[in-house]
């Protein structure tokens, strides 16, 4: 069964803390994505990666960074968490464009910043 | 600019009713893809369908059907004889073509429609 696994379902952090959200996929996909989901705003793309060590900004990259040292793993980093980063974070992966273009999602990580 | 609008924030129906979820999109691309995803309470978005912009045929899969109309830039989703298990948030999405070297497109999502099906 193909899978995208996010390391933590729920996290509670304090303002100013450094936060790591980990995502691992077992489908050998080239592309990986981090989205943020907020009520009334849908899903917004933070960063994506189309290859190991390659990353590109999405629509809302401010306050975030990413790391892709291995093909199967894509990490989202909040250098100094703020309360407005309280949200649901969704990781996804996909094969190259010439395939279905379908994104495979993890179950999400709900982050609360106090 | 690329945009997806799901005007219905929340819909409530009783089991066995038919329900249609609306999706309207804006794009400047001539080739694009439209998607529907389902997000059940567990949180994981599940892919339902992808439609190519050149293929306007309607599609039916069991109780699910999709109506793609390029003339009105709409890609609506109908559930026939709804069931409690259909309760979820449904997202419509549009692909935005990135540069070729990325070998991927970016998906732009609507704000979602929460469907509640009551027994």
Image (cartoon, rainbow, N blue to C red):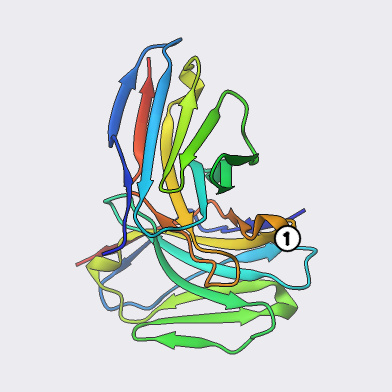
Asked which secondary structure carries label 1, the reply is helix
Quarter assignment of residue A41: top right
- Between A5 and B18, which is closer to the camera in this rendering? A5
Query: Is residue A37 something that shows in the picture?
Result: no
> For this rendering, which residue is in front, A71 or B24?
A71
Left or right? Give the position of B43 relative to A37: left
Q: Chain of mark 1?
A: B
Residue A19, can we see it? yes
| Occupied quadrant, residue B60 | bottom left
Q: Position of residue A12 (x, y in %)?
A: 31, 21
B75 shown above or below B111: below
Q: Which quadrant is the C terminus of chain B positioned in?
A: bottom left
Residue B113 appears left or right of B57: left
- Count of number-bearing discs: 1
Please indicate whether residue A34 sits to the left or right of residue A11 in the image.
right
User: What residue lies at 41% left-to-right and 12% top-to-bottom?
Assistant: A17
- Residue denoted by label 1: B100
Q: Position of residue A5 (x, y in %)?
A: 31, 47
Q: Above or below — where is B116 with respect to A75?
A: below
Residue drawn at x 51%, y 58% is B8
In the foreground, B60 or A25: A25
| Residue B15 vertical position relative to residue B115 in the rendered view, above or below | below
Quarter of the view holding residue A19: top left
Q: Residue furthest left?
A: B119
Q: Pointer 1: residues within 10 angstroms few (<14), some, or many (20+)?
A: few
Residue B59 falls left or right of residue A12: right
Which residue corresponds to the image point at 32% horizontal and 77% vertical from the top-left?
B17
Residue A87 in the image: x percent, y percent? 43, 32
């Amino acid at each position: 069964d193909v899978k995208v696994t996010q390391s933590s379902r729920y996290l509670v952090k304090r303002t100013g803390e450094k936060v790591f959200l980990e995502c691992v996929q077992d489908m050998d996909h080239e592309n990986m994505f981090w989205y943020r989901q907020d009520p009334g705003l849908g899903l917004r793309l933070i960063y994506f990666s189309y290859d190991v060590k390659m990353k590109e900004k999405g629509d809302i990259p401010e306050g975030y960074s990413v790391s892709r040292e291995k093909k199967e793993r894509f990490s989202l980093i909040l250098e100094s968490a703020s309360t407005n980063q309280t949200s649901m974070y969704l990781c996804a992966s996909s094969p190259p464009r010439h395939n279905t273009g379908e994104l495979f999602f993890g179950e999400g990580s709900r982050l609360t910043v106090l | 600019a690329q945009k997806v609008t799901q005007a219905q924030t929340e819909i409530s129906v009783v089991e066995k009713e038919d329900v249609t979820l609306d999706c309207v999109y804006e794009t400047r691309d001539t080739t694009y893809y439209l998607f529907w995803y389902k997000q059940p309470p567990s949180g994981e978005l599940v892919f339902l369908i992808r439609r190519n912009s050149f293929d306007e045929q309607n599609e039916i899969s069991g109780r699910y059907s999709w109506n793609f109309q390029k003339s009105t830039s709409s890609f609506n989703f109908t559930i026939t004889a709804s069931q409690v298990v259909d309760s979820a948030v449904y997202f419509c999405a549009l692909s935005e073509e990135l540069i070729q070297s990325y070998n991927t497109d970016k998906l732009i999502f609507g704000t979602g429609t929460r469907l509640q099906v009551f027994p």
